[in-house]
Amino acid sequence: MYELVTKQELAPNIYLIEIAAADVAKKSNPGQFVIIRLDQKGERVPLTIAGVDLNKGTVATAFHAVGRTTKKLAKMNAGDSITDLSGPLGNPAEVGKFGKVLLVGGGVWCAPLHYVAEALRKNSNELFIVAAGRTKNDMVYENELKAVADQFFVATDDGSKGNQGLDFLADVLKAQKFDHAVVMGPVSTMKKVVDLTRPYGLKTMVTLASLMVDGTGMCGACRVTVGGVTKFACMDGPEFNGLDVDFEELVSRQRVYLPEERMASMIHDKLEGGVKRG
Ligand SMILES: Cc1cc2nc3c(=O)[nH]c(=O)nc-3n(C[C@H](O)[C@H](O)[C@H](O)COP(=O)(O)OP(=O)(O)OC[C@H]3O[C@@H](n4cnc5c(N)ncnc54)[C@H](O)[C@@H]3O)c2cc1C
Ligand code: FES
């Protein structure tokens, strides 16, 4: 069993938890993920590592309560335990010495992006960071990202805070030369940034949250097409150069179980009620 040591609501339906898993914490690197299972019958849900505390022996992860498992997890509290946590899985993000790096985080993904940003900062990169969200209420990890940035911007889809959307990056990319880019967020955010960086041939690393089952290369559920070649996001990624990613295929594969996921989420809401905050 793995104990939830802390739980914090970062924004409506977005939570940060620290889970006691000292052995996993010791081996974790930015960009890697864990797969958790809440109970014996639970589904396996991948969550990206947002940081570790080696003194406490904990792994932090931020999650958006969108479906059955994450809504159940949102109802758990510090002191409760989950059945399984496997990890760290996947390859670490590239955090070498590049020079000037553009980082864009969308919604809940700003938390794991901060873990990547810290590592890039340690390697003396200059960081231009954008924290994005749907509205000003969905913003998370703004202060943390600002603290490690050389230049920091906020963007919201509805313009309620900072820039409206990410189009402003077109001017930024025209005016400044970047050596590397990292985007973590919904597919729409990753694709948007890749569309903007493509004319400059800027290597733009994206984290692909494809459907996963085992997370160890056994089932093939997570296959994605990168540079015309089939890759397994769990073993070959989850970070890939977005310039080579077939985003359309990714979106259609992510939707394969949408009716079942919606049904499971509705049943959860009916049987167990909405998410209790705190
Ligand atoms: C490598 C990897 C790393 C991941 N890291 C994270 C992470 O750090 N944090 C995190 O929150 N998720 C992360 N995910 C996604 C997470 O694993 C899935 O959202 C998971 O399916 C949730 O399980 P569930 O049972 O709660 O929902 P499911 O029953 O699987 O249903 C998810 C449903 O929610 C919908 N959905 C997904 N995102 C949103 C959204 N933003 N708003 C509204 N609807 C949405 C989907 O279309 C789907 O219908 C990651 C996925 C992968 C593969
Ligand atoms: S999740 Fe099964 S092969 Fe990647």
Image (cartoon, grey):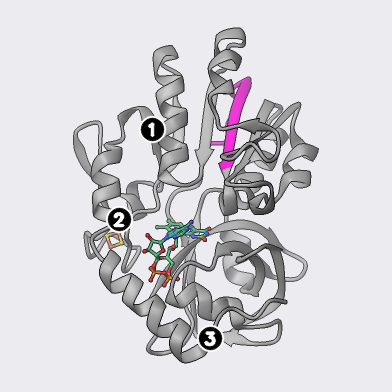
Residue marked by disc 2: 254
Residue name at image x 46 percent, y 76 percent: 69
Is 167 rendered above or below residue 138? above
Q: Is residue 81 left or right of residue 255?
A: right
Q: Is residue 159 left or right of residue 230?
A: right
Q: Quadrant of the N terminus?
A: bottom right
Is 130 rendered above or below residue 256? above
Mark yes or no: residue 210 visible.
Answer: yes
The image shows residue 176 at horizontal and vertical percentages of 61, 11
> Hey, what amino acid is under mark 2?
Gln
User: Is 117 or 119 nearer to us in this picture?
Assistant: 117
Q: Which residues are magenta?
A: 94-105
Q: Name the front one of labels 1 and 3.
A: 3
Residue marked by disc 1: 242
| Residue at disc 3, CB closer than 8 Å to ligand 1 | no
Identify the mark nearer the N-term, 1 or 2: 1
Q: Assess whether residue 103 is covered by the magenta stretch.
A: yes
| Residue at disc 2, CB closer than 8 Å to ligand 1 | yes
Badge number at residue 273: 3
Residue name at image x 67 percent, y 26 percent: 128
Q: Assess whether residue 52 is covered by the magenta stretch.
A: no
Q: Is residue 68 left or right of residue 212?
A: right
Mark yes or no: residue 97 visible.
Answer: no
Q: Secondary structure at mark 1?
A: helix
User: Is 103 or 20 nearer to us in this picture?
Assistant: 103
* Quarter of the render that holds ligand 1: bottom left
The image shows residue 87 at horizontal and vertical percentages of 48, 66
Q: Residues within 10 Å of mark 1 (few under 14, many from 20)?
A: many
